[in-house]
Amino acid sequence: MSSEEMLYAKGSKIWIPHAEQVWESATLEESYRKGAALLKVQTESGALKEIKVKPNGSDLPPLRNPAILVGQNDLTTLSYLHEPGVLYNLRVRFCERQIIYTYCGIILVAFNPYADLPLYGPNIIRAYRGHAMGELEPHIFALAEEAYTKLERENCNLSIIVSGESGAGKTVSAKYAMRYFAAVGGSESETQVERKVLASSPIMEAFGNAKTTRNDNSSRFGKFTKLLFRNHMGVMYLQGATMHTYLLEKSRVVYQAQGERNYHIFYQLCAARAKYPELVLEHQDKYQFLNMGGASDIDRVSDADQFNETVQAMTVLGFSIQQIADIVKILAGILHLGNIEVSKKYKDGNEEEDTESSEIFQNNMHLQVTGDLLKINADDLRRWLLMRKIESVNEYVLIPNNIEMAMAARDALAKHIYAKLFQYIVGVLNKSLNNGSKQCSFIGVLDIYGFETFEVNSFEQFCINYANEKLQQQFNQHVFKLEQEEYLKEGITWTMIDFYDNQPCIDLIETRLGVLDLLDEECRMPKGSDESWAGKLIDKCIKFPHFEKPRFGTTSFFIKHFSDTVEYDVNGFLEKNRDTVSKELTNVMAQSNMSLCKQVMVLEEVDTLSTDANKNTTTLGGRVVISANRKQQLNETRRRVVPSKQHKKTVGSQFQESLASLISTLHATTPHYVRCIKPNDDKIAFKWETAKIIQQLRACGVLETVRISAAGFPSRWLYPDFYMRYQLLAHRNQIDKNDMKQSCRNIVLKWIQDEDKYRFGNTQIFFRAGQVAYLEQVRANLRKKYITIVQSVVRRFIKRRRYLKLQAIISGVQRHARGYLARARAQKMREVRAALILSKYARGWLCRRRYLRLCHSVAGIQQYARGMLARTRFFAMRDYYRAVQIQRFVRGVLARRTYQKRRRQIIICQAAVRRFLARRKFKRMKAEAKTITHMENKYMGLENKIISMQQRIDELNRDNSHLKHKTSEISVLKMKLEMKKNLEFEFKNIKAACLDKDKLIEALNKQLESERDEKMQLLEENGHSQEDWCSQKQMWCMENEELRRQIDSMIEMAKNSEGNQKDREERLLAEIDNKELNEAYQRAIKDKEVIENENYALKEELSRIQQHSNGLGSFGMHHARSASNASSQNDEDIGYGSAKNTLDINRPPDLINKSDSFFDSTSIVVKLRSILEEEKQKHKYLQEQYVKLASRNKPTEDSFRVSELEVENEKLRSDYDQLRTSIKHGVEINELNAQHAALQEEVRRRREECIQLKAVLLQQSQTLRSFDPANDSGNVNELMEAFQSQKLVNRQLESELKAITEEHNSKLVEMTQAIERLNLEKGDLQEVLFKSIDEFDQANVDTLKQNDRYLRLELKKAITQYLLVQEELKLANAKLSAYRQDGGKLENKLEEEMIRNKAANNSNDLGANVAKQKTQNPLGLMKFHNSDLDKILQRLLSNLTPRTVVGLLPGFPAYLIFMCIRYTDLTNADEDVRELLSKFVMQIKKMHRTPHPIENRVIWLVNSITLLNLLKQYGDVEEYVKFNTEKQNQQQLKNFNLFEYRRVILDLIVNLYQALVMQIQGLLDPKIVPAILNNDEIQRTRHPHGMRNRSMDATSSPEHGNIPAWKQLIGQLEHFYKQFQHFGLDAVYAEQIFSQLLYFVCAVALNCLMLRGDICMWETGMIIRYNLGCIEDWVRDKRMSNDVLTPLAPLNQVSQLLQSRKSEEDVQTICDLCTSLNTAQVLKVMKSYKLDDYESEITNVFLDKLTQKLNARQMPKSDEFTMDQKFIHPFKVVFKYSDIKLEEIELPSHLNLDEFLTKI
């Protein structure tokens, strides 16, 4: 059977032509056989038809694609690539599934749904961000994402070409593409640049869009928008945009067809006329330019709201209020200009009409209003509307205009004004959008008109279709290029594809003597007309194949475009091409008093795109290329900017140039295509008009793309996908799971015989059109066969099971009946048998009793007889045994005597024989030892070793010489390298010096210019300064007099205060002297204690040294060896000598000194005694100094200070007198200023000193007055002295304790290392000793003895040193413990003194106004200084690592901070607590804003919660303190109410929670989709349709050995769970975090599922259910609450929905099932559901009923089918009581906070 016969079998579905629907589906009634001429088919309507076919089968009707390929995302993946297949696939997607986007290769086909769809929100943008094109459903965002990704990756320019006919949605598609770029290139919350880019759309729509019969918002111009991006650290950011426009439809300003409108801005202005009363506007129907079409309003559109939006957008884009007002006036002037009536003019003196002229009344209101609005002369405007001027060589002639010419002049002026205004607005937009900074790359969005054909086609349609021809040519070339690159990349052979080339049609339009050339030539003719031009066209262009002349008349012509043949009417071509306007009218407008009007009218036509492309430099591949013909281009640009009447370019030539520049720009970019399709003309949502759509598909190039794809290998399958789909087509022995490519080859070779039907690429298999459908048919047949077999087996099993069940029932009944009869018969038999047994047992019992009596009698007699016989036999056997034992011992003694005697004799004999043999053997061996053979055998191996060693030495010598040679070369090369580096360094220095010189020259030039300017300024200021001198001199005189008065008053005050202060100063100085004496006395006592301690330590050291010398004296004199003489051993003792050296050298130097110091013990004792005597003398000298200081009573320092003050006072007086004399004698002003400044500074310093002295004296006097001078003065002085001395002693002891501790720690480390080293040496020595004992037979006896003596000596040394080290270690530990005890006692004393002193001060402070609260128990406090606050927080926040936190109490830093807060509360330091909490909050916020590991965020979330709970627990609030203990209630905060800070910390906790959740979500995001929607254990192909994927799926291989994705996701959750546990996060908060994470998992997976219709099938529901079950099991294993799983409900319900039955009877069940899904989500799943081969189809009736049921539910209505991924549930903070005792918290040393925090 051939493939055609297999494919065209009975029941196959085909396509047949239809008059209205274009194509109709039909089913074959009979199988096709080769040579048949007819095919019997049945249409979908039930009609039977016969179709004629050729016998060779070349015109067989096209086949329908298999069901699996219906509704594909990409049209090129269809197996049968033909027009009906493409049309049907689009219809299924658009009408049934309501999907408006479809791929066609590189084209995105977009249908206008005429309905608002929820497809463009922020959630959809986030869903498509980062996904390659083809991973999700087709979308304009997917195309934009691919362009943006290519921009980021390759840093190249790209373009998006949006085309389609009017009403197809081009503008909306371009708008959404730009919205996507603005979102991903900036942020979702629009920045200034993004707002400007998006705000440009309302402006351009208002001024360039209008309502037509096909579209309510039709763009009447072409627009190419360049979105400019800059590269910042690898990320592309949107920085601006530029806009280029093409061919604005100016004729619409003055004329609209029926049912159409003018541009939107006119109607918006009329709707907002109340805001601008000065415009004198009325309703739009009153204006001639607005009421022609008769459709002034648009349904569901408010022109007033649109105007407000336009004005707001203009404000955003930088239009000033004056500019907007002027633009509005110009627009109103155009409307009033259109209402100027041109009437008939009559000849003078009669009523005869003058047909050569016309009239405009001077009192015409609209004429006057136009003049007022545009600020022009209304009379001049009226004059040149009625007249025209014709210029000759030397003169000009005025000719009146008739009515038609006057109206034409008026309309031309209106079009000209609007075109210039539009050009001006575009220029302002470009200036605002482009900030002028250098951009990296751009993405261009081209929104251009599609192919147009109307009943009457004019110049505009001609230009539009010409542009589409050029774009279609560029598109064809690009598509062909991509196909070629795909084949080359896969490495397959291919033939040239014949594609349609429309170059002949383009040549017809733009070549020499083409349409445009002839049109321009005719426009230059003085009397050129449309008819003459049409005649020339027919004469000159008839040779072109794409040109046709009309059958009748010469007023039209035909052009065969690529999509259709269009008839163009020549009327108006010349006028529109010339686009002429009266020069006099433009001069009138240019003379306007309105600046904007004048500015607009002088604008010239410039091709902005070519100007933008031909800038000073062009970039190519990252390099700057300077154009060689720049001068010529500038000249051409100037000529183009300043046109004249003779050389003014026509509209056609301008359009041709701009189109050429556009095409060149597109060629320089990577294009992406969007083809917009208009489904119907009625603007009804989702209505399908086949004829209209097929015409658009042909026109926009979609079918051409399909044809190009079909000419090659359109169907392409990845090897894994093909293997998973078609592996059942091959036998088991042809399948190799390890070699998937070969398996796929075997499958293809088995079923496709023609080698031209397929190609094997590197990663894909390429098939011709129809081959995939053929394989699908084969697969369906095989599956049907196998399913039939399975069904037969299953049916047999069911029938057999039923038969066995029935058989078992019958057997059971029979069994029970037979059992009943058997039991009855057995009962009877049992009764008979029982009677016999009873009689038997009765008889037996009687006989047994008689027999037992007889047996008892016989047994008694036998017993006594047997006993007597046994005793007789026993006595005989005993006697025999005793006789045998006696004989045994006697015979043994005799035998041993004989054995010993014979043994002695044999030994004597053996000894004699052995002695004889040994002597003989010794003599023989002695003779042999003297022979040469013996010596050779002995030294044979040694010679071989010597030879081999000699060879090895030679080789090493050669290598050494070679290496020396290389080393010398390396040195030379190094020298050269250094020289080269020096040269490079010098070159760089010279270059840098040159640059510095250049900069210096520039700086000097700038400095020179600035100095010139300064010189001029100085000259000007000199004149002003002379004028100001007199006034300033008078002011200075007044100030001097005021200073004299102040100084006199100060001198008097100082004299008066001297007497009063003397007594106070004397008392103060006496107290200071006493204090100094006491301090000196304390220092002396301290020095004495230090000396005594040192003396005691020296004595201990001396005694220990003497003991050491006595212990070592016994053997040290004879056996001690040093490192120098240890090597003087015998050569045979090499191994031991090295060991001895190592032992001596590695010994610590202090121990070596101690071991050798007993030789000089006498000298050491003498030195120590001398040191002791010196210390005693020092002590005596200090005591004498103390006595001298105590005897002195006069003041010292303060007296000097007073004398110094007196001297300074005298100096001040002298300076004052000098100042007075200088003023009298008129000294220079500079000296006066200097003296004044010095005087002011001195006065300020003296005032501060006086104030300080007064404060000190007042404080001392108050202190002295507070005590009783008679009784308590001595006690107070002693108490103060003791307190000060105690503080000094404590500080000194702390410093000494730290120094001693560090010293002993270092010594302890050294000693520990020495002990370890000695242990190692001891082990080595023992190993050597044991080894030497084992080798005793081979060693020399003398050597062994010598080694043994040495080892014993070294062992004794090591033991002695080890004991010394241990003793020193014990002494150090004892000293350390003693120091710690002393330090603790001193700290306790210091605390007691501080508390006592504070209590005394509080009791005696009589001047305080407010009494502080009595402090509570001070335990649980952390004392700190305010200056150390930053360091404390730095070490607690930034330096705290997760590894450190794990070993601490959960929330330990929070406890420390709270203990510091309690300390500030105890001292009532409100500034300190405010600064502490503020800095804590600021540090946490700083860490929250900057990127940090998740562990740090968890740590400070825990600590923030703990701190908040502590503030509540100890905040004296009844709600939180009811569980406190009595001790905790005593530790409440007494002075502060931190309610506001609790709120701040609560907000901080919420921010930390949100940042933590967002960071975890970022880590989980890439794992969610493969973990939820894929599963390796339930593997099945993900792309069974063979789609041309843009990205490879890593899980497509069924044999990949990676960890399953769901396990990776659970592993990640497990990791976070362990972190929460390790850092002490409470379960309540962990459950909230996991609940949020599971919501995020659900949102990401559900959004991806909604946007991937290819996986909406039954299998996916099973996979989701399995994966969610694993997550639920993990949650339950962790004993979390069931509320954690609540966010997964939508995903669970989606999985159940995918696995549920989808019939009309199950509608209510589905509604009850989907309680967490809205209507849009359920319908999206149902419409995207992919049916299996044997599933029943989802009908429209079912969908309608389901929609009604879902809408009837009591749920919020929403059209969004996606979930908000960025939604974060609110965080609930719960109070938790802490039973941790603050007084038991200790400060760990490894936190390095001991120097800043002190526990009180």
Image: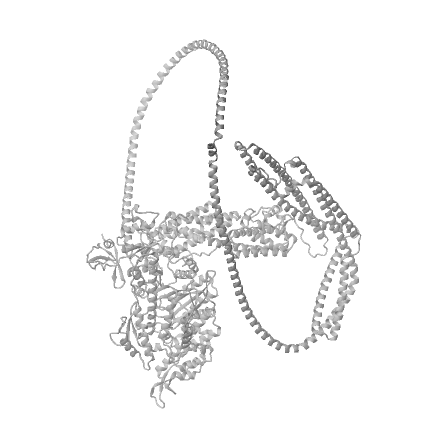
**Apparent side of residue 695 relative to residue 1541 in the rendered image (left or right):** left
Q: Is residue 612 above or below residue 337?
A: above
Could you tell me how many numbered marks the image carries?
0
Quadrant housing residue 1252 = bottom right
Of 185 and 831, which appears nearest the observer? 185
Residue 1146 appears in view: no
Of 1266 and 184, which appears nearest the observer? 184
Q: Is residue 952 above or below residue 32?
A: above
Measured as percent of width and height from the top left, residue 292 is found at 36, 75
**Apparent side of residue 689 relative to residue 1290 in the rendered image (left or right):** left
The residue located at (31%, 26%) in the rendering is 826
Measured as percent of width and height from the top left, residue 739 is found at 34, 48
Measured as percent of width and height from the top left, residue 717 is found at 33, 54
Residue 894 appears in view: yes
Of 1559 and 1502, which appears nearest the observer? 1559
Q: In this view, does 644 lie above or below 239?
A: below
The residue located at (47%, 34%) in the rendering is 936
**Apparent side of residue 36 relative to residue 726 in the rendered image (left or right):** left
Way the structure is coloured? one colour
Measured as percent of width and height from the top left, residue 1074 is found at 77, 53
